Amino acid sequence: PAGSQSAASGALPGASTYTVISKGGDHSEVVIRTLLGDYVEKGVNHGRKFFQKTPNKSSGDLVEVFLYYWDNRDGPNFEGWWFGNKLGGTQVWSHCADKGLVPPSLGWKIPWDGQVRPTLQVGPKHEMDRKEAEEKLKSISADVAKVDSEAKQAMQQ
């Protein structure tokens, strides 16, 4: 996509935050590492909110990454949600053809013209945090049940 709108300098009051995670063993891939993290709402582009990645200075993550929607003004192949270094820029890492009002959770292609990467997930931060907490609780509960069962078996011997 060509052309762009400038990003606002700070987060908007009451701005929403999205999180990008990967459920696969692909965290060592440069593109995946570039995309993972939190994205804060910064404004509107082509009738949809756009988001900018919050830099993770501790990991040396200094690449600017935007999550934004692009309409069909450049043709149907360019319509959808994008991860790129600026709104409408030519350096893009991932694309999803979804036309929804919010970033889609699944269906992201990496590279942008490649295959869908089912491990990449995008969602509202509060929902992603809740899901992660629930998964951890299930795992811990399963571990406790296993230890409890083993302890009961040991006491019966």
Image (tube, rainbow, N blue to C red):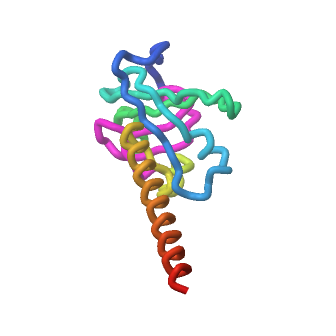
| Residue 134 location (% of width, % of height) | 40, 52
85 or 123: which is nearer to us? 123
Q: Does the stretch in magenta take in 73?
A: no
Query: Which residue corresponds to the image point at 40% horizontal and 34% vertical from the top-left?
Result: 74
Q: Which residues are magenta?
A: 81-108
Query: Residue at the right extreme?
Result: 60
In the rendered view, does 82 fall on the left or right side of 48? right
Q: Is residue 42 left or right of residue 26?
A: left
- In the figure, 142 relative to 92: above or below? below
Q: Residue, x 30% and y 27% (percent of image)?
A: 47
* Residue lying at 48% horizontally and 70% vertically, measured from the top left: 148
Q: Is residue 92 visible?
A: yes
| Residue 82 rendering spot, x and y as whole percentages | 46, 38
In the rendered image, which quarter is residue 127 located in?
Answer: top left
Question: Along the horizontal axis of the image, is 144 left or right of 123?
Answer: right
Residue in view at x 68 percent, y 34 percent = 59
Residue farthest along the top direction in this orientation: 9
Considering only vertical position in the picture, is 107 above or below 154?
above
* 64 to 6, vertically: above or below: below
Residue 7 location (% of width, % of height): 47, 18
